[in-house]
Image (cartoon, helix red, strand yellow):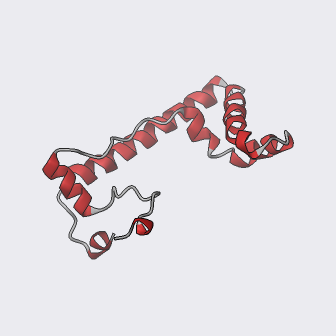
Amino acid sequence: MKHQDLDPKESGAHNPYRVLLQKLTGTYSQRPRVKAAVNVWRKTARLEIDAIVKEKDLPHAQMAKHRNQTAKEMFARLSVEEREQWAEQAKDEHEEALEAWKAETSGDLSTTPEDRQR
């Protein structure tokens, strides 16, 4: 396999041989982390955040910084109840991701053709 054939965006976490190698060597993929409530919320407000940042007419290199800052400011303006709901949703998403991670790392390798092809 040539270097250019490797996709840097693909972590290989779904590769059954990688899982087997991790089991044999005792090194496992990273456990999922809990996302901040603001990061879960900002996915739903992406268009609004982008519109506000684009109005500022900033250089491209500063866009990410200002998107993050705008999202935090907008999230802080939400009511306490709404912020708590987003925190609860972040917790729920983490629990789902954790269950999927545990199933992937602790179970037997799948024998379905779809999983083997991945």
* On-image quarter of the C terminus: bottom left
Residue closest to the far top: 80
What is the x, y in percent for residue 32? 38, 41
Q: Is residue 91 above or below residue 22?
A: above
What is the x, y in percent for residue 114? 32, 73
* On-image quarter of the N terminus: bottom left
| Rendered image quadrant of residue 109 | bottom left
Residue 23 lies left or right of residue 65; in this view the side is left
Residue 31 lies left or right of residue 40; in this view the side is left
State the residue at coordinates (81%, 41%): 58
What is the x, y in percent for residue 93? 45, 43
Residue 25 lies left or right of residue 35; in this view the side is left
| Rendered image quadrant of residue 33 | top left
| Rendered image quadrant of residue 52 | top right
State the residue at coordinates (67%, 41%): 64
Q: Is residue 26 above or below residue 18?
A: above
Q: Which of the two residues, 88 or 100, is positioned nearer the viewer here?
A: 100
Q: Which of the two residues, 83 or 29, is positioned nearer the viewer here?
A: 29
State the residue at coordinates (74%, 42%): 49
Q: Which of the two residues, 2 or 29, is positioned nearer the viewer here?
A: 2
Q: Is residue 63 above or below residue 22?
A: above
What is the x, y in percent for residue 82? 63, 31
State the residue at coordinates (33%, 60%): 14
Residue closest to the far bottom: 113
